[in-house]
Image: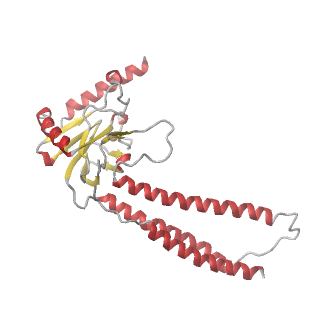
Amino acid sequence: MRRSIVSRLAGVSAKAGLAMVLALGMASVPALAQNAATSPEVIAPQDWHVDLQPAAGPVKEAIHDFNQLVLWIIIAITAFVGVLLVYVMWRFRASRNPVPSRTSHHTLLEVAWTVVPVLILIVIAIPSFRLIYYEDRAVDPDMTINVTGRQWYWHYAYPDAGDLAFDSYPIADADLKPGQLRNLDVDNPLVIPVGKNIRVLTHGQDVIHSFFVPSLGVQKYTIPGRTLETWFRADRPGTFYGQCNQICGQNHWFMPIVVKAVSPAEYEAWVAEAKTRFASNGAAPAAPVAVAKADDTAATKVAELRR
Ligand SMILES: [Cu+2]
């Protein structure tokens, strides 16, 4: 009797599981379109912050959706296993079962607990691959930014704006202005227009760094001798903070990233102004000077820490 109930339960739950898996799979793959709205906001790491950073664009929104799906699956599994454990501890306790059952196999049940996890993994895999391909490259980019990781600062180039290129360094503690974030704000932020799909091409000049701006859903290694592609878009004006999240050497903490998203008109004005300001920069590596600058600032930091 017990065997037949178990068999039926296993059969029913397998069917229900399959239906649920397929429904979840469908529901969890909304159309991921790369299309674009416009008060400046600031998204930066916060003390005791739990969960992912808020999304400033569609890539991060897609990441949020996927995270949400996996979170609910984990909650369901944890709750199911927890309830089952408590039930078994109560139902099969020694005082109630002086003669223990010698049941050791149940084919259908064993098939079910193999197949159901596989189906759950499929439900996770389908949207996961979709997300990977969505993040991979911009289908129809409006502009390109070349990001170069160097020891230890960022170099940004805007090939669509001629030879506009510049370096981005963190601001030393002593020079921080009110409102600026320690170890996060930089002298020259990466300025982008709101609503534009931006192709990002990364490469490393010396070691592997990682271009990581969580609120825009972008993280890409910068690897010497190799160009990698990704994309992002900011749907709202704001300032979005990130940092190199690849341990790249002694001044790794020297590589914060600030992305400033402004209206297209403001962006055009910035490009015109920046072209003059960074006219002498060119796209050529300014490594010796830059490294010296990084080391100087690092030395200042170390001196500050020792004080
Ligand atoms: Cu780095």
**Residue under the image location 35 percent in, 55 percent down:** 59
Measured along the vertical axis of the image, is residue 29 above or below residue 147? Answer: below
Which quadrant is the N terminus positioned in? bottom right
Tell me if 165 is positioned left or right of 108 in this view.
Answer: left
Residue 230 image position (x, y, % from top left): 29, 54
The answer to whether residue 131 shows anywhere in this view is: yes
Q: How is the image coloured?
A: secondary structure
Residue in the foreground of this view, choosing between 200 and 261? 261
**Residue under the image location 74 percent in, 80 percent down:** 3
**Residue under the image location 75 percent in, 65 percent down:** 88
Which quadrant is the C terminus positioned in? top left
Measured along the vertical axis of the image, is residue 253 above or below residue 97? Answer: above
Q: Quadrant of ligand 1?
A: top left
Residue projecting furthest to the top: 307
Tell me if 14 is positioned left or right of 157 in this view.
Answer: right
Residue in the foreground of this view, choosing between 123 and 269? 269
The answer to whether residue 284 shows anywhere in this view is: no
Residue 84 image position (x, y, % from top left): 70, 64
Measured along the vertical axis of the image, is residue 218 above or below residue 284? Answer: below
Measured along the vertical axis of the image, is residue 27 above or below residue 180? Answer: below
The mark tally for this picture is 0
Residue 201 image position (x, y, % from top left): 24, 51
Tell me if 5 is positioned left or right of 55 in this view.
Answer: right
Residue 224 image position (x, y, % from top left): 26, 48
**Residue under the image location 39 percent in, 54 percent down:** 61
